[in-house]
Structure formats: structure tokens, C-alpha cells
Image (cartoon, helix red, strand yellow):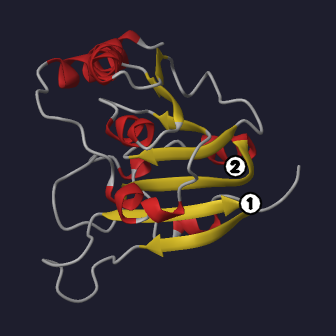
Amino acid sequence: MPADLISKWNERYRDAEHVPLACDVLLQNRHLLPPQGRALDLACGLGGNALFLARLGLQVQAWDISDVAIGKLQNLAEQESLPIDARVCDVEKQYPEPDCHDVIVVSYYLDRQLFPVLAQSLRPGGLLFYETFTRAHVSDRGPQNPEYRLQPNELLSAFSGLQILFYREEDLVGDVMQGVRDVAQLVEVSICER
């Protein structure tokens, strides 16, 4: 793992004292979640998505490059006796196995090379929840490098073999002080046997 990248994220999470929250696309579409199964919170940070999924009864893996973030998540999971397997790993080098997850959540992380891997990691009927920054934005939130931001409608064609259940990307249309801005949100389901 690149030491400078690990240091960057460890520094960011070291002083974080807020309670991690699940991303909006997961909260708004929780009615789609299965009552049980295996879930993955990829590039989990402090693990808001992982905690949310585990509280609903799913068996959760949470992966991140930051050992500080993973340590904090492990402590929270232990305090609540939640079934979270939190691991330090470089998600650009260690991929999830095929056909093994019922739910995958990715929030505020973008690596386009992982798109086919994520689709293949879902079991038939498995759900992908994805929310991350877009190039059309009205605030300074998120990365400044446009390569780490989605192009317009990019998520719509990113995952072959999946069916769109929910998509939202408001771009700069209308009153930009209202609505969901700066991000694209997607929920898809795996419909094909591989």
C-alpha cells in the first residue's frame, strides 16, 4: 500500500469524533435491502454504511486502507456487538470474490477499474448502492481532481449485468441550493446468472 496515501487517510480519520452515518442513497432506499445476507462496505472510512447494515442484521465486511478508520470501526462494532469484519486492505489491489455478496455499498470513492469486479461480486439478486461526487458541483466538497469525480450519467452505464432500480443526479438544473447536489446516487440489482 502506498505509504503517503495511508498517511493521508489516517490523518483525516485520527481526529474524527463524529458518529459515522450511512450514505443518503442507502438510507433512502433501505426498503430494498434483504433481511439477511452478506454485505460489503468498500472503502468504508469510519464505517457508517457498515454499522447501518449490521444493525439491520446483515453480516458485514468493511474494507479500507486506513488502519485508524478500521480501528475506530472495530471499536464501535465491539461496543454494539455487531457482526462486522473490518479489514485494512488496499481495495485497488485486493478485490472482492465473485458471487459472494448480497449487498455492496460504495460511498464517496471512485475507482473505475473496480466497476466490473463489483458487478461480478454480487450474487444474483444482489444489490449495489453507489454514491459519489460528480464533476458538476455547487460546493467545494469532495476531491478537486476531476478524475475522482463522475462525468454526467457515468454510473448509468458503468455496471453491465445489473438493472437500475434507482438513479439520481441533479447536475446544475434548477435551484442549485435545493435537492441533491454534488453527487450521483445509484441502486442496481444483479439479474443475470454468471
Q: Residues within 10 Å of mark 2 (few under 14, many from 20)?
A: many
Residue under the image location 66 percent in, 61 percent down: 189
Q: Residues within 10 Å of mark 1 (few under 14, many from 20)?
A: few
Up the image or down, 24 lies above or below 9; here it is below
Whichever of labels 2 and 1 marks the residue nearer the N terminus, that label is 2
**Foreground pick, 6 / 20:** 20
What distance separates the C-alpha of mark 2 from that of mark 1? Answer: 7 Å
SS label for mark 2: helix
Contact check, label 2 and label 1, Cβ < 8 Å: yes
**Residue 29's quadrant in the figure?**
bottom left
| Residue 113 in sight from this viewpoint | no
**x and y percent of residue 123 in the render?**
75, 46
**Residue 174's quadrant in the figure?**
bottom left
**x and y percent of residue 119 in the render?**
69, 49
**Foreground pick, 44 / 149:** 44
Please give the label number shown on residue 160: 1
Q: Amino acid at mark 2?
A: Ala
Residue under the image location 58 percent in, 72 percent down: 165
**x and y percent of residue 179 in the render?**
23, 77
**x and y percent of residue 162 in the render?**
71, 62
Up the image or down, 57 lies above or below 160; here it is above
| Residue 142 in sight from this viewpoint | yes
Q: Amino acid at mark 1?
A: Ser
Outermost residue on the bottom side: it is 174
SS label for mark 1: loop
Q: Is residue 59 left or right of residue 122?
A: left
Q: Is residue 84 left or right of residue 165?
A: left
Up the image or down, 175 lies above or below 167; here it is below
Residue under the image location 48 percent in, 12 percent down: 1
Q: Is residue 177 left or right of residue 70?
A: left
Q: Which residue is mark 2?
A: 119
